[in-house]
Amino acid sequence: MADPELDFTTGESGASATIPMQCSALRKNGHVVLKGRPCKIVEMSTSKTGKHGHAKVNMVGIDIFTNKKYEDMCPSTHNMDVPHIKRNEFQLLNITDGFMSLMGDNGDVREDLRVPDSDLGKEIEQKFRLARCWVAFCRITEV
Amino acid sequence: MMAAVGAPEVISQLESAAKVLMAPPSMVNTEQRQHAEHIFLSFRKSKSPFAVCKHILETSKVDYVLFQAATAVMEAVVREWILLEKASIESLRTFLLTYVLQRPNLQKYVREQILLAVAVIVKRGSLDKSINCKGIFHEVSQLISSGNPTVQTLACSILTALISEFSSSSKTSNIGLNMEFHGSCKRIFQVRLPFLPLLLPPAPFSSRSFFLPLLFPPAPFSSRSFFLPLLFPPAPFASRSFCLPLLFPPAPFSSRSFFLPLLLPPAPFSSRSFFLPLLFPPAPFSSCSFFLLLLFLLLLFPPFSSVHLTECYALSGLVVVCVCVDTFCACVFVLMCVHVQEDNLRQIFVLTMEVLQEFSRRENLNAQMSSVFQRYLALANQVLSWNFLPPNHILSCVRSVSPLGSLGRHYIAMFESTQNVMLKPTETWREALLDTRVMDLFFTVHIKIREDSDMAQDSLQCLAQLASMHGPIFPDESAQVSYLAHLVEGLLSMINGIEIEDSEAVGISNIISNLISTFPRVILTALPSELFTSFINCLTLLTCSFGRSAALEEVLDKDDMVYMEAYDKLLESWLTLVQDDEHFPRGCFVQPAVQVFNSYIQCHLAAPDGTRNLTVNGVASHEEDEINELQEDDRELFSDQLASIGMLGRIAANHCIPLLTSLLEERVTRLHGQLQRTQQHLMNSSNPGSVDRKVLDDLYEDIHWLILVSGYLLADDPQGETPLIPAEVMEYSINHSTEVDINTTLQILGSPGEKASSIPGCNRTDSVIRLLSAVLRTSEVESRATRASLTELLSPQMGKDIVWFLKRWAKTYLLVDEKLYGQISIPLSTAFGADTEGAQWIVGYLLEKVINNLSVWSSEPELANDTVELLVCLVEKRERANIVVQCENWWNLAKQFASRSPPLDLLSSSVQRTLMKALVLGGFAHMDSDTKQQYWTEVLHPLQQRFLNLINQENFPQICQEESVKREIVATLEALCGIAEATQIDNVASLFSFLMDFLSSCIGLMEVYRNTPETINLIIEVFVEVAHKQICYLGESKSMKLYEVCLTLLQVYSKNNLGRKRADVAAEEDQYQDLLLIMELLTNLLSKEFIDFSDTGVDDEVFRGQEQGSGAAGRSVSAADVVLFGVNIILPLMSQDLLKFPSLCNQYYKLITFICEIFPEKIPQLPEELFKSLMYSLELGMTSMSSEVSQLCLEALSPLAEQCAKTQEKDTPLFIATRHFLKLVFDMLVLQKHNTEITVAAGEALYTLVCLHQAEYQELVESLLATQRDAVIYQRLADAFNKLTASSTPPSMDRKQKVAFLKSLEEFVSNVGGLLCVK
């Protein structure tokens, strides 16, 4: 497994991070790169210019990291980039100074991720204190 | 309580509350507003508020307070009616009336509300005869004759208020009247029933809004119909003097204003009544659409309780009356209601005729006169549009057939839902309507006023109504013939004498369409032949001319497409005319058909042959709009028009088929040339954007319409039937078969790449085959262009048209079955019959087309979809599939798809699914066993192999998130859905075992992809599809397997999702989709209980015996287990937020009710937590969801209570729960203002619960009685409760007793409902 970038919001790993795919083969709930951002497709529709025109695909995607909304339209014969999305599962071992110690499936431990600054983060901390055993999920993307 | 406080304090309190309510939102907060609302609410509920209200009315200056005072009086009068002195009621009424009379400047809504109170008093009084209606009418007629416009308006308002009060019961409940009143009405109704025929003339009640609530027999409102005759005994006043002032209301008076007050108060009403929110929904929501919606609901969900239905109709009637009608209609409405007796209706008509006659003689009409004229015309229209109901004895027959009246109701609903009321008067109208002068008058009137588009609409509508006249009014056929002849003569001379205005088009087409659809063929053919011919000629010219104008409207993109509407109507009439044309002289429609057909084609072709996109002055306009996917394709959008034109084309096949062929062939040649030139141009130019698409687009559009018309002409597309070659087409081909050279025909057919005209002897071909080959030539030009990389230049629309045509054609003509026809055309059977080279060649050609399209057009979802539909059509019939699988191309396609490589993997997922379906269907064609083996090895096994190889890799858990792996998995899952879709009764066995292997592996995937919601979603979908398509065919052991695997799926899902948190935005939607799918799965599994085609009935019975006897012996899992387990998963995930998705909420409660009804015995065995949450769900659904949901929950209670009674165990959790529900249902029925539509469901639930918990029920009754301090009320309540259970003591679970209980419950609710609402 390639070493994933630590700061995942601006991840950059050099390896090919996307694969091209014809617009028509994209699907709702799938992923696509819109305006350079990896997005989950939440809406997809087609349109055409004139009755005898060719189809164009209109897409609305939500950035999987920032939840920002992006829209794009392109001819349906064109290729769009589909990001490699990799979901990894880590077990939470400990929390120190707001950083989590996480163990991956292969036993490697990483301690570079903050407890999210949100309700979810608070809940993680709380539950961790209660049970000392809590499975956290995060997404690491190679983009 | 309010009365105890001094009147001035009350006033000041109310006035300040009104100020708060009326203040803009920024000034007051919600609490203040709620408090103010509460003040008004409790004021209206206060006991005997009459003195205070009088005082308020006399002193307060705040309109809103006046309004509330009027409302309070109205509610209190009804509430305390039996406790009030008759004299004081009478004085109250007089006070209110005088009050209004003396204050001409009252706000309209206050005035209307006070008059409404008067009306309510009159209505209530009419029940026990304490108020003399005659007296009221005497007063009103005096007001009318006063000559003072203000007073006359007031009189009009009083009448309207009365009518509203009597016409619609839901209205009365809105203003606080209660069920007690309806009960009393019903009693009167029952008493009067024997006299009914005396009171009611045969068919008088018809103003739509008026009688809707009246005619539903079982509901309480039916009584209302008998009030009118009671209230309005034959004309106590001279009808003329009474009508006239009403017809010309001097001051603007609008029925709308009547409802204004209801709109004003922000909350008090909505909290009290369920109907208001419906009537005045917060969102902009037109009342008309609401009305339509109601009608829809009624048609869609017939099994609603009777009360519900009535209520809806009452409502819809109300909406129509209150919102849609304008001032004048309101007056006519009053008139018509006053004159409900048919005699009076006729009198109005005769009177109207006189006035119209008078006007039509005048030379000049000034503005005022013409507005009077218009009103009379509209009145005439109202009379002629009167919906004469069938005589009552017919309705009562219908009623007696279905004791619950449901059939009768449906009958009336059907009767009423027809938008166009046909004129069907009784015999008594003969004199009035068969007089030719009546019709002449309307023609004269129309000519006179036709410049005024509003009036012209009325006069044409009158004529259209006259053209729809039928029924007993005609003494015999000859009368009908002469009536029709006169009508047609008048019509022709009118049309010929004028140049039709835009505003007349629809009206005139209505006259013609009514005439053609109403008068039987024999009457039409009995017309003098000259007259008939000129009528047909006129119709032809009119159709062509409207068609041209309609095309013009399209070019100009007009909002109001009047000519299009008129054209549609006329084309529809043609269809009616020619559909059974054997009655008419042979060939009499051929020439007209040629003309109409030609004009249609002309309008749709570009210049120079046609006039498409040409404006009047010959300027072509051409715009390219952005078209989204929601826009319907022309073949759907214009399907009615095309069907008519296709039909006319068949009538004139001799002309039309060759015409289409030559036009299409010529355009295909031009398209070919144009594409070649463009290719040259592109090769010489570096800029591909420089191509002028105008010429190409014009050709595409021409070809588009030619193919559509050809498709509709050559074949029909009946759903679920075997389409036949139209008789006219067959006959045409047979008639010409002697002149046809079959070999040349086949040569033309078999060489789509060559120009048809270049083949020697091309004039001696069968035209039907030639038309198909013209389309094949189009298809060939398209295919060649794609091979020359000119796809960019092609039109996907034309591509769609081609495959659409080929599919429609193939269904009808390919492998034509000679047994289905009396006579068959030799060219057709030689070219396309079974075992012919022609058929094989065509199949091969179509297959090649499909393959080419799928690789070239993967980016055009709709075209790709139409293409795979063509493929499915080729293989879904065994005979065609047999040929298909002999083609090498088919095998190539199968292999290519199995290899999951481009271009097929670029297709959208839905297309891939359908493609998989087609490939599987093809696999069941006739092949020798080796070939079959080989086929499956190449189609299905690669799927399995690749899948197994992938998931069995050791590092699968590590690589599973890689994009290529994910895509492979997704493609497999999609393919599985496609395979499930291909299930048919004869292949289910093999498909099921194939799919089962996958289903188990899919469960493993659930684990692996637990963090990838889109994949999880797809996996569940596979299960849903398999259950949906296969469960009904599965025998016991196989269903069991499916249950087991579904159970495991649910277990894994629940393990992975319980207590899980997700941070991303789409989480809720993902979850919503999962849950919806799971519920769909459970419902599909449950459907086995209703629909079962498997032939293991005996086994099943044996099995059921085991199930009940020794628990789960012999079977590891049952549908009930799976479903209950599924519910167990769903329940904890079903958050209140998710229940806000209406579809999810409904599906959820449907499922729960199903379970309770089907497996009540399983409920007590549920784990405690699950049981609790199920009960909580029921309670929640009953109390705080929509009425539909609460009805579902109530329906679930009876089986549960019965289950308890069966086991006879006390103190089980279910027993205790039902006790709790008893209280809930009791409160709901007795104490709360509930929605009447759930009374029946609640009643049934209550009865079974009472049977179960008699002692608790007694307690409830006693504790309720104990709270009553008023002796009168106490006594009435106690009596009512005694009566309620009298017929069913001791209560037992016996159907007869239950019915008796339900009956007395209805009365009980009417009796006590109102009493207990007084707090």
Image: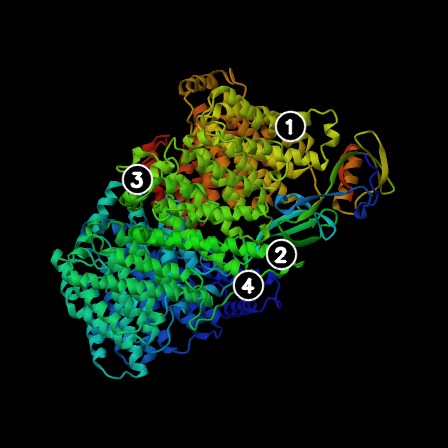
User: Judging from the image, what secondary structure is the residue with disc 1 in?
Assistant: helix
Kind of residue at disc 2: Leu
- State the separation of the CA atoms marked 2 and 3: 47 Å
Residue B1248: assigned label: none
Q: Given this view, does label 4 or label 1 mark the residue nearer the observer? A: 1
Q: Which amino acid lies under the numbered mark 1 shown in the image of this protein? A: Phe
Does B453 sit left or right of B1215 as displayed?
Answer: left
Seen in the image, is B701 located left or right of residue B1076? left
Judging by the rendered image, the residue that carries numbered circle 1 is: B947
The chain letter under disc 2 is B
Residue at label 4? B36
Can you name the residue that lies furthest to the right here? A97
Residue B428, percent from left and from top: 15, 60
Query: Which corner quadrant of the image does residue B107 belong to?
Result: bottom left
User: What residue is disc 3 on?
Assistant: B825
Residue at 22% x, 56% y is B588
Most extreme residue toward the front is B760
Q: Nearer the viewer, residue B197 or A17?
A: A17
| Colour logic | rainbow
Quickly name the residue at label 2.
B682
Respond whether the residues carrying marks 4 and 2 are from the same subunit.
yes
Of the residues under marks 3 and 4, which one precedes in the sequence?
Answer: 4
First in sequence, mark 4 or 1: give its number.
Answer: 4
Real-space CA distance between mark 2 and mark 1, rounded to the nearest whole angstrom: 46 Å
Q: Amino acid at mark 3?
A: Ser
Find residue B1100 and report its horizontal and vertical position in percent: 43, 20
